Amino acid sequence: MPKRTILHVESGPAGPDVADEYNRWYDEVHIPEMLAIEGVVAARRYAPLDGDTYVAHYEIEGDPKDVMKRLQDAARDGTMHLSDTARKDPPARMLLMELVAERDAASG
């Protein structure tokens, strides 16, 4: 069974005055552009209960290094559109994570 990998991203709006625009961009532009990258097969986004840092999980199929290179290429060549409404300080935090255990309440 192939290993399951996610790209975990922590980001947020540049300020409260652009939060709605940031969320619209993320949901309507950024996630579809991410899903257009070969190897990114699903996206989930989580809003903070307090604070202003959002979390997105992108499921990766295939070699994560290859997928990350395609993401970097898309950002560099303009295929992926970044937004001025995204917080730059601190910048988005990205971590590649590999599934090591999975369990649900029904299976104990």
Image (cartoon, rainbow, N blue to C red):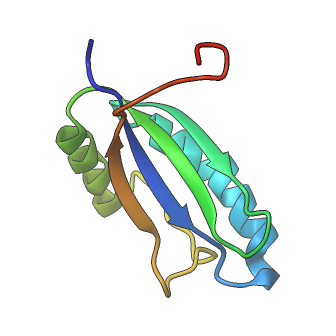
Side of 49 where 95 appears, left or right: left
Please state the horizontal and vertical placement of residue 76, each as a whole percent of the image.
29, 62
Q: Residue at horizontal 78%, vertical 71%?
A: 50
Q: Residue at horizontal 64%, vertical 82%?
A: 14
Side of 83 where 97 appears, left or right: left
Please state the horizontal and vertical placement of residue 68, each as a whole percent of the image.
26, 48
Locate the N terminus and report the quarter of the image it occupies.
top left
Please state the horizontal and vertical placement of residue 35, each as a whole percent of the image.
48, 36
Q: Residue at horizontal 59%, vertical 74%?
A: 86
Side of 22 where 50 appears, left or right: right
Side of 39 where 42 appears, left or right: right
Image: 101 above or below 17:
above
User: Across the whole image, how many numbered discs are drawn on residues?
Assistant: 0
Locate the C terminus and report the quarter of the image it occupies.
top right
Image: 81 above or below 101:
below
Please state the horizontal and vertical placement of residue 93, each as a whole percent of the image.
43, 68
Q: Residue at horizontal 24%, vertical 39%?
A: 64
- Rendering quarter of residue 59: top left
Image: 13 above or below 107:
below
- Rendering quarter of residue 21: bottom right
